Image: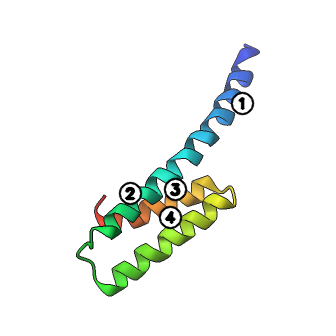
Amino acid sequence: MRCLPVLAVAFTLLAAPALAFQCPMDMAAIDAALAANPTLSAEQLAEVTALRAEGESLHAAGDHDGSVAALAKAKAILGL
């Protein structure tokens, strides 16, 4: 029974770096999609660019949950 809290803490500590590694992959996917000149309106392109920049800033600040969320919105607009 004492192992359960220890395992929960260990899982939490191991999950954070996994999210940290997802951010650069998401940013690379967005960059590749933008390099392919997607068919987006000017407003959509501006939103994707802003979300991509927000995701990078949040990642650099250590807010990987926020980064993943912002990058997911950008990927959704791009249809990824």
Of circles 2 and 3, the one toward us is 2
State the separation of the CA atoms marked 3 and 1.
22 Å
Query: Can you name the residue that lies furthest to the right here?
Result: 2
Residue 27 drawn above or below residue 52? above
Q: How is the image coloured?
A: rainbow
Residue displayed at 52% across by 56% down: 68
Secondary structure under badge 1? helix
Pointer 2 or 4: first along the chain: 2
Q: Determine whether, in the image, residue 65 is placed left or right of residue 49.
A: right
Residue displayed at 48% across by 68% down: 52
Residue at numbered disc 4: 70
Residue 9, numbered circle: 1
**Quadrant of the rendered image containing residue 37:** bottom left
Residue at numbered disc 2: 29
Of circles 2 and 4, the one toward us is 2
Residue 46 drawn above or below residue 74? below
Of circles 3 and 1, the one toward us is 3
Residue 78 drawn above or below residue 3? below
Residue at numbered disc 3: 68
The reply to whether callout 3 and callout 4 are in contact (CB within 8 Å) is yes
Query: Can you name the residue that lies furthest to the bottom here?
Result: 42
Residue 62 is situated, as x and y percent measured from the top left of the image, at 68, 55
Pointer 1 or 2: first along the chain: 1
